[in-house]
């Protein structure tokens, strides 16, 4: 769930989140906080990452939202799909929080990037590999190599 949690101007609507949790339960909900870097850190963005919202990706916001979901999916929109490397600063910030599962998405171009998420996220952050994965037409990460890496670190 992402854009539905905000009005069209980007104002967070907690009542929508509360109603959703009441309807389906927190254990079935993943909150997707797609974000863009700015001078203050990272701002959650919606509408294909074009509309900034009134939420920053901070430990306080994660603490506020965590009771209402099973997991966070955090997209680093500035590097998403570019296969130029991860946003290490964002991964480090997420790793220092780590109270419920977090999956990081954005920029992973190689197994080295996957390892960076593991290291900089203090082992608390999962990672998705999209455009670089051979199954999706990429040439940076072979699926079999990723599975083997995951089995080694699990």
Image (tube, grey):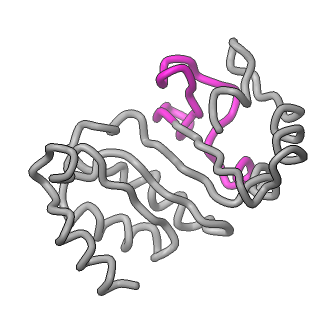
Q: Vertical placement of 91 versus 119: above or below?
A: above
* Magenta stretch: includes residue 54: yes
Q: Residue at x 40, y 85 (%)?
A: 154
Tell me where residue 44 appears, x and y as whole percent: 59, 33
Tell me where residue 103 appears, x and y as whole percent: 50, 58
Return the residue nearer the eye: 64 or 134: 134
* Magenta stretch: includes residue 83: no
Return the residue nearer the eye: 120 or 118: 118
Tell me where residue 146 appears, x and y as whole percent: 24, 69
| Quadrant of image for the N terminus | top right
The answer to which image quadrant residue 98 occupies is bottom right
The answer to which image quadrant residue 8 occupies is top right
Q: Vertical placement of 8 versus 5: above or below?
A: above
Q: Which residues are magenta?
A: 35-62
Q: Vertical placement of 122 versus 82: above or below?
A: below
The answer to whether residue 132 is left or right of residue 11 is: left
């Amino acid at each position: 769930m992402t854009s539905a949690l905000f009005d069209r101007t980007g104002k967070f609507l907690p009542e929508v989140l509360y109603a959703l949790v009441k309807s389906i339960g927190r254990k079935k909900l993943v909150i997707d906080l797609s974000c863009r870097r700015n001078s203050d850190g990272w701002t959650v963005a919606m509408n294909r990452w074009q509309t900034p919202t009134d939420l920053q990706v901070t430990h306080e916001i994660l603490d506020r939202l965590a009771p209402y979901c099973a997991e966070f999916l955090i997209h680093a929109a500035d590097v998403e799909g570019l296969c130029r490397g991860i946003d290490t600063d964002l991964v480090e910030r997420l790793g220092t929080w780590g109270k419920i599962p977090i999956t990081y998405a954005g920029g992973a171009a190689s197994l080295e990037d996957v390892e960076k998420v593991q290291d900089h996220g203090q082992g608390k952050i999962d990672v998705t590999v999209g455009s670089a994965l051979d199954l999706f037409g990429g040439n940076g990460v072979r699926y079999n190599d990723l599975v083997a890496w995951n089995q080694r670190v699990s």
